[in-house]
Amino acid sequence: MIRHRGPDQFGIYLDDHVGLGNARLSIVDLGGGQQPITNEDRRFWIVYNGEIFNHAELREELLARGHRFETHYDTEVFLHYYEQEGPACLRRFNGQFGVAIWDSLKRELFLARDRVGVRPIYYTFREGAFIFGSEIKALSAHPAVALELDPLALDQTFTGWSCLPPRSPFAGVQQLPPGHCALVSAERSVQVHAWWRPDFSTPPATPTLQPSNPPALRQTPPASTNSVTSSPMPRACACSRTCRSAPTLLEGSRGHRRRAAQRLLLHRRPWPRG
């Protein structure tokens, strides 16, 4: 049901209490990174969808603390930081993710979703089983799951473009809200907590970047752009025809400047109307 999400690799972990599966689209560590991934003593197992942009820096911190790595994959960084700090590790990550970590010693399943919910997690209880996935289609593969539309969720979707978490479009299926994590015990109880909330208590800083300041404009994109272009895979950028997106494209295509310039020239003409 989820093969389309990752054509490169597919892995499964099974024990007497849990089953984890993952379909992988290789972005980082193309030759390694087969999921599920475990830690040194095989206590923790992880399946993960997303990307941690600051994983290289965090890896160095973990190596200094004595952790051993089998891959160069950001997923393994996530797992070892969870081993080190537990749920508090989530605040260390700059990225987007939906993650599940199984603690085989405590027989607990930990789920977490990134700050603004770029990567989803859906779950349901059916016939004493806790079933979860990054797509509702994955849940429907279980024989006990019969999906029925939720009229209130449809009303919310047609009114505000999306139903409000934890509701999903289907009755009995919930989504983990953005910025939340959950702990599922062996007794199938679920404890959901917010690990991040937007902070509006501090007034935003007065913008200092002005169009008349080209050096500052050139210096702004690298920090954010470089953090998301560490993969060796080909890059693409969807941008508008303004000065805001042009520096991002040029910085993200460093080493391929000629090709990036050709893309910019290609769209100099006005877009067709109608």
Image: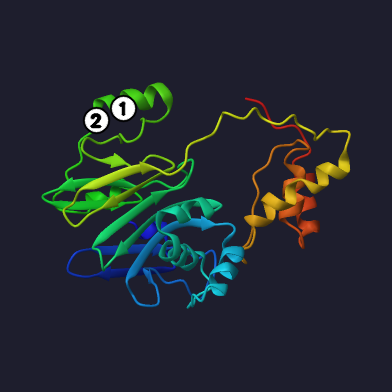
The answer to whether 176 is drawn above or below residue 260 in the figure is: above
Q: Is residue 60 above or below residue 143?
A: below
Residue shown at 20% from the left, 52% from the top: 130
Please tell me which residue lies in front, 175 or 162.
175
Q: Is residue 213 visible?
A: yes
- Seen at 58% across and 57% down, the residue is 53
* Above/below status of 184 relative to 107: above
Considering the image in quadrants, where does the C terminus appear? Answer: top right
Task: Give the residue type at disc 1.
Answer: Leu
Q: Residue at x 72, y 41 (%)?
A: 245
- Is residue 1 visible in the rendered image? The answer is no
Q: Which residue is mark 1?
A: 154
Where disc 2 sits, the SS reads: loop
Residue identified by numbered label 2: 150
Q: Percent position (x, y) of residue 212?
A: 89, 33
Camera-nearest residue between 118 and 262: 118
Residue 151 lies in what quarter of the image? Answer: top left
Residue 148 drawn at (x, y percent): 20, 36
Q: Give the quadrant of the N terminus.
A: bottom left
Side (left or right) of 245 relative to 133: right
Q: Is the C-beta separation of discs 1 and 2 under 8 Å? A: yes
Query: Residue 163's quadrant in the figure?
Result: top left
Element carrying mark 1: helix
- Residue 228: x and y, percent? 62, 55
Left or right of 268: which side holds 234? left
Measured in 3D between alpha carbons, the distance from the residue under mark 1 to the one under mark 2, in whole angstroms, is 6 Å
Q: What amino acid does circle 2 point to?
A: Asp
Q: Residues within 10 Å of mark 1 (few under 14, many from 20)?
A: some
Residue 50 percent location from the top left of the image: 48, 55
